[in-house]
Amino acid sequence: MTEALIHQTAENSNDSTTVTPVPATAQLSPADVEAAVFAIADRSRSAARKMAHANRAWKDRGLRAIGTALLERKDHILAANAKDVAAGRANGTRASMLDRLTLTEARIDALVKALENLATLPDPVGNVVRGQTLPNGLRLRQINVPMGVVAAIYEARPNVTVDIAGLALKSGNAVILRGGSAAAATNAALVIILRDALETVGLPADAVQTVDEFGRDGANALMRARGRVDVLIPRGGRDLIQSVVTNSSVPVIETGEGNVHIFLDSSADEEMAVDILLNAKTQRPSVCNTVETLLVHSGSTVLPAVAKALRAAGVTLHVDDRIRAALPAGVETVAATEEDWATEYMDLDLAVAMVDSLDDAVDHIRTWSTGHTEAILTNDLANAERFIADVDSAAVIVNASTRFTDGGELGLGAEVGISTQKLHARGPMGLTELTTTKWIVQGEGQTRG
Amino acid sequence: MTEALIHQTAENSNDSTTVTPVPATAQLSPADVEAAVFAIADRSRSAARKMAHANRAWKDRGLRAIGTALLERKDHILAANAKDVAAGRANGTRASMLDRLTLTEARIDALVKALENLATLPDPVGNVVRGQTLPNGLRLRQINVPMGVVAAIYEARPNVTVDIAGLALKSGNAVILRGGSAAAATNAALVIILRDALETVGLPADAVQTVDEFGRDGANALMRARGRVDVLIPRGGRDLIQSVVTNSSVPVIETGEGNVHIFLDSSADEEMAVDILLNAKTQRPSVCNTVETLLVHSGSTVLPAVAKALRAAGVTLHVDDRIRAALPAGVETVAATEEDWATEYMDLDLAVAMVDSLDDAVDHIRTWSTGHTEAILTNDLANAERFIADVDSAAVIVNASTRFTDGGELGLGAEVGISTQKLHARGPMGLTELTTTKWIVQGEGQTRG
């Protein structure tokens, strides 16, 4: 699972200008769409029941069958994708959006490789979370079981179709997909291939279904399917996620933005500071764990070296007045406004502010952070401990790059996304986060006194 | 934490007929109320930061200080409560509702005892969930940390005020309360006592706040306070919970109903079946883990004995035609309708249906269950395993009473409630479920390659 599959910027798929053929269902009333979507969810529930019984070997056969089918039908997929891309181009869709919409042989190969990686991972289902024998002899264990019906609402990136289906199937779930309609032809082709492949190994085709044909009404019906859909995962830009979070009565797992901070304490080593800042800002600026704001302690002596290294790497520094005054004249900067503290640039830009204390740094972070990842660079043990305790984010890092907040890097195997909410999952989410738990209590006639 | 504090039936506090004095804030517009509630949430955030730093000993001192204050100011509490009860009586409030509204010396003592029990429990905060050292030397651990700001919306049961505040504080959170306005005078008195007690031990008074003065608009504002409130816990009847689940953009933990089933397999022992059914139905019929439907395998020979025992205990049996035909003439029954399969009686009533197989039993359960608890009584190992695997409920029990689905019985210490949702927590919830996690990554300059 590469980050590119997961982190998207806030661009909409612009349904209104899509020229894919209008499906027969377009005339349906919202109530009719809701009935149709709920019927799909009920078929998904039946399929989920079968998926929950499939052991790891069976599910892995399904993932590999999907991989094989994707390779065998590559030409068909690329032809469908070419239609979507041509339509997008005709609509004047932006280049970055067209790029996300486009599948290539290499991208299909990468999807197949990700499925193969999923097949090598342990099965989260059946893992015993905890257990004990009670004084009255009851044997108690809490185990991971599949969520059941997982739904995903995402933008016009057809690789997400395969990605999220693979994750859901590996964790024993059935999945209902709603992709951006600008990718409708590609998604339709992919869903047929996935369903056929599942059937070849005896898994239920209905474990993968789509509501794309119902457009926005379909997405809205999914959000109202509480009790029928167990969890809804929005994947995409800020607007999409906020819309789902606000409108869904189905529980949502939010994978959010990263307005990531590094605090450069006065005791931080210069070489380490330069290395980490360069890595955190320039290794892959477009992803959510890249640093966006550097907070520099007023006692730090390494700021000039860090600033020069970042400038040499092409980073635009958006600085406050005190940082400007502390830098040599030769270091080019632009003046920061309050907006910079709030901005997730996802580009070669960095906001830089001076603070007089660790407390001031923490206050800045608490004001502006999205709760994704924050790091401190320091050689002061007490400050490291206080930073860890005081910063309320999914990941808190001491003396390492913020780029490590990633399921793959942290050893979780596949990554569903990085949760910035506090309920259910926080930080990098692995397959286990697509499961729930069940208590199993076994006795021989015990009653309660 | 007794079940009586947690499980409530669907009676509303009937705000419109309350005769408690109209507060000065009643003229505020919804926008003004929202601003006021958000300001309360922001003070709660500051208090939460202090609570997160309080170690176990300090928090336990706070709980005990609250207990002492409740005892010292018992007369004051009872006087305030008498006003609410008198107003309720004047409004014609039903007796069962008045009973829930009423505090007595004994009930205050029970609250203090529950606080003392909380103080004896381990602190969930700081527990290491998992950890490892990565190949690159990064030290990784995921620890439990407080949620932050917990809000609760509940009905006119003033004991919930103390109960939920104690749970939230013990787990290092700040809490915002919205109780039923029929208990407004009692809640106002309690909140002042709680806040004062926290201050006496140096904990922030704002760790306990109320939005009761804003009425329904206050509750609505709480539900919109996403980002300010970390989790919202509705406690009360079905209507209250459904309303919160549907309208809240703040993540919700739903503690739900229990339409609990027992499947009497043909191999079940008669004595065990009689004991467990009597216990599960009659020991405390008004709570959520009491059995509501008995499914009897058509090959079972113990039905008459079970039915006679239940009748002797005063249980009304709502039976289908096949059960009626299988019972001796002397066993009194009433005919079941489909509504019986859906009903959580919470009383000395039991629906009884005959099924021809374990699969039919599971199908019935999947159709009608609320996903709380189901049990099988059997001596057949394969059937036990299939029931465990096939039933998708928070707790699945083999050969024991359904009454064991309870945080106290299952060794969790205090109980926040029984979650029937799949996200975050499922089944009995302990203090840990009022925490989230934080990843802590420690290195010495590691960057990502």
Image (cartoon, coloured by chain):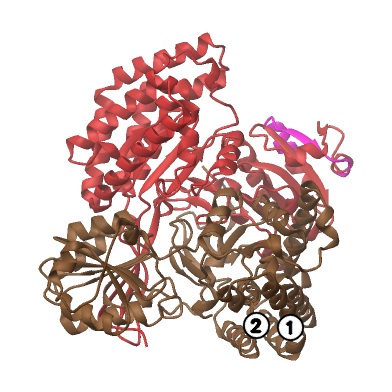
Chain colours: A brown, B red
Chain of the residue displaying label 2: A
Which quadrant of the structure image shows residue B175? top left
Q: Are marks 1 and 2 on the same chain?
A: yes
- Left/right placement of residue A277 relative to residue B99 reads left
Looking at the picture, tell me which residue is in the foreground, B27 or B98.
B27
Read off the residue under disc 2: A103
Asked if labels 2 and 1 touch by Cβ distance under 8 angstroms, the answer is: yes
Magenta span includes B91: no
**Residue at x 28% of width, y 52% of height:** B52
The disc at residue A77 is 1
The region drawn magenta spans B307-322
Residue at image x 48%, y 64%?
A131
Q: Specify which label sits upstream in the sequence, 1 or 2.
A: 1
Q: Is A315 on the left or on the right of B154, as rendered?
A: left
Which type of secondary structure does the marked residue at label 2 adopt?
loop
* Label 1: element kind: helix
Residue A38: x %, y % from top left: 76, 54
Q: Chain of mark 1?
A: A
